[in-house]
Image (spheres, rainbow, N blue to C red):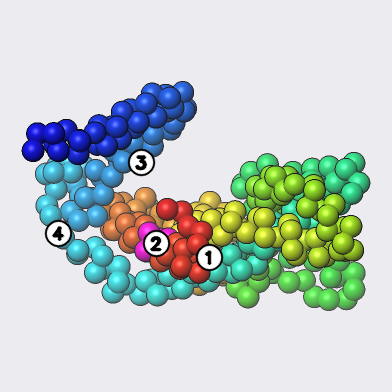
Amino acid sequence: MKKDDKVNNKPVKAKKVRSKTAVKGDISLWMFVLPGLILTFIFSYIPMYGVQIAFRDFNPRLGFLGSPWVGFKYFIRFFESPYFVTTIKNTFLISIYSLIAGFPIPILLALGLNSFKHKKYRKVIQTVTYAPNFISVVVMCGMLLLFLSPDAGILNKILSFFGIAPINFMGDKSYWRHIYVWSGIWQSMGWNSVIYFAALSAVSPDLHEAALMDGANKFQLIRHIDLPSIMPTAIILLIMSCGSILSVGFEKVFLLQNDLNKSVSEIISTYTYQVGLVENNVSYSAAIGLFNSAVNAVMLIAVNKIARKSSGISLY
């Protein structure tokens, strides 16, 4: 029996030795990962202690633990609020619109630039498309308000030249979503195409040369070589985009928002700002934010599972 135990323990000991050796061999890699893990733990996981504010009637003088526990009171209040349907609908519509319209454009831009033979002109196009990403949100919104002004806006000047009456674009709610989404696409499409362009640079030139020798044209090269090579990257980014479906940025919406378009521009983040900072109802705003995060987490898990089953590609 003792001999058998020794024999049976040998594979276990061998595995332990190999795992220790692997860890020691990758110590340099761990040194690169460690700062990111520490920062993530400090700034992402430790603040989760404050999530309990959503379940308490928070009073700064009493602190987290001293404030009375109210359970799901503020969640129920949000679900019964007349703003619940409006904010969820507006946030969801903006996110879906941005995803459907904006997700394919960086892919098409990267594929087009990759097949562009003239490197000089390609660099010019890349610079032109990358540059808007470095415009701050405040400046971007100021440009939109200036260009679309019903009095002095350049677009209305052009319309007036053709005898068309000026349009208050920012005051007409039918235009607001289009302005928000397409200005965002213009600003970010170049930067978002970088990761696809990097993935395309890993494609072996031998594949293109072999396809050209077989008589393939540019469209066939893109369809059968380039596009399949970036599909794993595109699927991962799509999963991450769906995981933030209700996380529409606050700054741009808030700066473009006014009383005339508020029925379509009031989203979860702006409503959270209103009740949390303006009305000083911290617990209520925390409950709304936690609900938002929970929906995003569920969407991320669901889309990741669907992607894993359909394509074999997933985050984990």
Separation (CA) of disc 2 from disc 1: 15 Å
Which image quarter: residue 285? Answer: bottom left
- Considering only order in the chain, which callout, 3 or 1, is on the residue closer to the N terminus? 3
- Considering only order in the chain, which callout, 1 or 4, is on the residue closer to the N terminus? 4
Residue annotated with mark 4:
70
The circle on residue 301 is 2
Task: Pick the residue in front: 150 or 106.
Answer: 106
Mark 4, secondary structure of its residue: loop
The circle on residue 311 is 1
Q: Are marks 2 and 3 in contact (CB under 8 Å)?
A: no
Q: Nearer the viewer, mark 2 or mark 3?
A: 2
Q: Nearer the viewer, mark 2 or mark 1?
A: 1
Separation (CA) of disc 3 from disc 4: 25 Å
Mark 1, secondary structure of its residue: helix
Q: Is 255 drawn above or below residue 122 in the view shown?
A: below
The percent coordinates of residue 123 (x first, y second) are 83, 42
Task: Pick the residue in front: 315 or 99.
Answer: 315
The magenta stretch is 296-301
Q: Main secondary structure of the magenta part?
A: helix
Q: Residue at 38%, 71% (x, y): give it.
A: 83
The percent coordinates of residue 292 (x first, y second) are 37, 60
* Residue 220 left/right relative to 280: right
Residue annotated with mark 3:
44
